[in-house]
Image (cartoon, grey):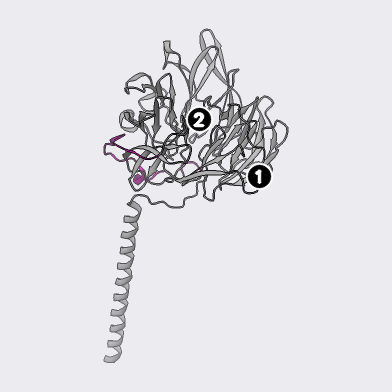
C-alpha cells in the first residue's frame, strides 16, 4: 500500500510540475506577444468589411512627444531630368485626373508590356508622386528611421536628389503614408500620416515651416491615417484641419496663417481632399468631411467665408473627393454602403443654396469606395465598390443626367480598389495586383486596347501620375516609372 501511495504521490508531483511548466511557457509566450505587438512596424492581416471594424487601438495613436518637423536633410547624387511634363498635385493640374498636354501615346503594347524605365523601393503605403521640372516628389515612411521622409527623385532614373525628414512613430495600419504632395516652382507641401504638414523649397529641399494638425488644431486623425492631399493656391497652402478651425490658408513662404474658417459645424477630417470649384463667378473650396460638405470662399476679398453647408451628405468613412460640374452640380460618393449623391448649387438673393437632386445606393448607380471618379465629356468613370451587387469592382461609364450606367467592364474585368487616369483619349486602370489595363475613353462600350502585369506586389492603390509620356505607379512597397509612348 505504501508503494502504491508513493507512486500516486510521484505521479501527482509530476502532474504539478508539468502544469507549472506549461503555465510558465504560456506566460512567456504572452509576454513575448505583448512586446512584439508594442514594437514598431508590426502588422496583423486584418480584413476590413465594415466601417470601424478595425478601429485604431491605443498603440496606433499619435505620440504625445513633440515632433521636430523638417529636422533632418540629406543631399544625394541624383539630378533633375530635362524631360518635359508635370503632374503638380492630387488629380493633376486641373484637379480632374486628366492629363491634357498634347501627346500621342501608344495604343497597344508588346506582349512584354510597356517599357519599365526604373523602379525603387518604398516604405509600405499608398502615397503617390507629384512631378515638376524633372523632379518626382513623394512622401515616404522609412521604418528604419521611424520617420516621414519627403523624397525628391530624378524623373530620368529614380535616383534621389535630396530628402527631408523628421522622426515620428507610425505603426502599420494598411500602410503608412498615403498622400500626394502639392508642388509649385517654389514650394512643396506634404502631409504625413499623423497630420504633420511640412513646407520646403522645391529646388533645394530647405525647410520653410511645419504644422502639427493634431497638436495645434485638435485634429482627429481618421481611421486609416491622414489621406487629405494638400493644395497650394495663390502661394498659400490650403488645409482642412477640421479641429478648432475647419479650413486655413498658410503663406508658403513663412508659415503665417493668413485666414481661417472656424469649425462651427463640428466637421471631422475624412480621407477626402479639398477641391476648388468656380460657379456663378465665385471661386470656392469644396470639402466633404465627417459631418457634412462645405463650400468655402477662395476669392481674395472674403477668403475663408462659408458659402454653403449641407449635412445631407454625411458618412462615417469618405475617401473620394467631390467632383464639381461647370453648371453647379457636385457629385459625391463613398464606400461601405454610402452610395452616391448628386447635389446642385444655386444662387438666389445674394446667397448660395445647395440641394440634393438624387441619392443612389451602391447597387443603383455609380459609387466608389476609394478612388475619386473622373468627369470626362459629361460622363463619370469609376470602379464600383464591393457592395455593388453583380457589377462589383467593375469599371463603369455612368451618365449622371439620365442616372444610368452606359456600360460596364464585365465580370472578367474587375479592378478592386485600384486607381485610374485619362490621357490621350485613353483610360489607364491599375488593379489591386499590379495589372495595368488600357481602354479607349469611349461613351459607347468598354473597349480594351492592351493589358500588362507591371508589378508583382499587392495593394496597388496609390493614384497614378503622368508627366509627358511617362507614367508613375506603385504597389504597397515599390514605385515604377514606365514609358507610355512605345518608342
Q: Is residue 383 visible?
A: no
Callout 2: few (<14), some (14-19), or many (20+) C-alpha neighbours within 10 Å? Answer: many
Tell me residue 31's x, y (percent).
31, 59
Location of residue 77 (image quadrant): top left
Location of residue 198 (image quadrant): top left
**Residue at 48 percent of width and 18 percent of height:** 284
* Residue 217 vertical placement versus 454 (above, below): above
Callout 1: few (<14), some (14-19), or many (20+) C-alpha neighbours within 10 Å? Answer: some
- Depth check, front residue: 209 or 156: 156
**Residue at 53 percent of width and 11 percent of height:** 281
Q: Is residue 445 visible?
A: yes
Asked whether the beta carbons under mark 1 and mark 2 sit within 8 Å of each other, the answer is no
Number of the front mark, 1 or 2: 2
Dominant SS in magenta:
loop
Mark earlier in primary sequence (1, 2): 2
- Depth check, front residue: 416 or 26: 416
- Depth check, front residue: 268 or 119: 119
Q: Which residues are magenta?
A: 50-77
Disc number for residue 125: none
Tell me residue 260's x, y (percent).
37, 19
On the rendered image, what quadrant is the C terminus found in?
Answer: top right
Tell me residue 465's x, y (percent).
52, 35
**Residue at 32 percent of width and 77 percent of height:** 15
- Depth check, front residue: 351 or 180: 180
Query: Mark 2 highlights which residue?
Result: 87
Location of residue 382 (image quadrant): top right
Amino acid at each position: 500500500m505504501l508503494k502504491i501511495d508513493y507512486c500516486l504521490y510521484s505521479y501527482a508531483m509530476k502532474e504539478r510540475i508539468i502544469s507549472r511548466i506549461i503555465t510558465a511557457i504560456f506566460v512567456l509566450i504572452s509576454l513575448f506577444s505583448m512586446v512584439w505587438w508594442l514594437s514598431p512596424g508590426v502588422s496583423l492581416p486584418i480584413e476590413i468589411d465594415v466601417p470601424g471594424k478595425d478601429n485604431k487601438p491605443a498603440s496606433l495613436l499619435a505620440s504625445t512627444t513633440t515632433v521636430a518637423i523638417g529636422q533632418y536633410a540629406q543631399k544625394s547624387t541624383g539630378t533633375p531630368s530635362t524631360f518635359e511634363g508635370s503632374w503638380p498635385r492630387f488629380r493633376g493640374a486641373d484637379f480632374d485626373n486628366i492629363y491634357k498636354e498634347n501627346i500621342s501615346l501608344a495604343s497597344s503594347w508588346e506582349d512584354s508590356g510597356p517599357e519599365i524605365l526604373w523602379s525603387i523601393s518604398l516604405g509600405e503605403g499608398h502615397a503617390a508622386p507629384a512631378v515638376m521640372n524633372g523632379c518626382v516628389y513623394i512622401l515616404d515612411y522609412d521604418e528604419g528611421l521611424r520617420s516621414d521622409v519627403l523624397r525628391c527623385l530624378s524623373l530620368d532614373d529614380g535616383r534621389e536628389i535630396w530628402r527631408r525628414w523628421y522622426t515620428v512613430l507610425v505603426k502599420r495600419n494598411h500602410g503608412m503614408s498615403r498622400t500626394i504632395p502639392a508642388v509649385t516652382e517654389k514650394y512643396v507641401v506634404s502631409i504625413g500620416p499623423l497630420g504633420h504638414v511640412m513646407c520646403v523649397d522645391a529646388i533645394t529641399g530647405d525647410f520653410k515651416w511645419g504644422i502639427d494638425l493634431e497638436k495645434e488644431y485638435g485634429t482627429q486623425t481618421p481611421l486609416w491615417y491622414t489621406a487629405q492631399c494638400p493644395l497650394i493656391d495663390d502661394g498659400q497652402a490650403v488645409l482642412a484641419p477640421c479641429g478648432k478651425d475647419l479650413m486655413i490658408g498658410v503663406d508658403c513662404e513663412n508659415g503665417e496663417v493668413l485666414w481661417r474658417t472656424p469649425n462651427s459645424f463640428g466637421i471631422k477630417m475624412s480621407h477626402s481632399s479639398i477641391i476648388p470649384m468656380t460657379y456663378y463667378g465665385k471661386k470656392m473650396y469644396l470639402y466633404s468631411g465627417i459631418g457634412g460638405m462645405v463650400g468655402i470662399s477662395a476669392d481674395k476679398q472674403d477668403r475663408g467665408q462659408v458659402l454653403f453647408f449641407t449635412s445631407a451628405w454625411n458618412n462615417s468613412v469618405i475617401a473620394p473627393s467631390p467632383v464639381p460640374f461647370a453648371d453647379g452640380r457636385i457629385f459625391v460618393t463613398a464606400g461601405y454602403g454610402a452610395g452616391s449623391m448628386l447635389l446642385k448649387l444655386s444662387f438666389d438673393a445674394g446667397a448660395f443654396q445647395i440641394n440634393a437632386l438624387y441619392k443612389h445606393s451602391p447597387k443603383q448607380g455609380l459609387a466608389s469606395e476609394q478612388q475619386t471618379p473622373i468627369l470626362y465629356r459629361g460622363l463619370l468613370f469609376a470602379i464600383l465598390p464591393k457592395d455593388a451587387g453583380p457589377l462589383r469592382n467593375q469599371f463603369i461609364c455612368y451618365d449622371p443626367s439620365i442616372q444610368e450606367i452606359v456600360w460596364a467592364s464585365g465580370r472578367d474585368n474587375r479592378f478592386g480598389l485600384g486607381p485610374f487616369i485619362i490621357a490621350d483619349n485613353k483610360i489607364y486602370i491599375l488593379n489591386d495586383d499590379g495589372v495595368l489595363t488600357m481602354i479607349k475613353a469611349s461613351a459607347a462600350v468598354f473597349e480594351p486596347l492592351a493589358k500588362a502585369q507591371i508589378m508583382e506586389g499587392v495593394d496597388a492603390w496609390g493614384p497614378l501620375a503622368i508627366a509627358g509620356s511617362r507614367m508613375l505607379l506603385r504597389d504597397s512597397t515599390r514605385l515604377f516609372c514606365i514609358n507610355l509612348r512605345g518608342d
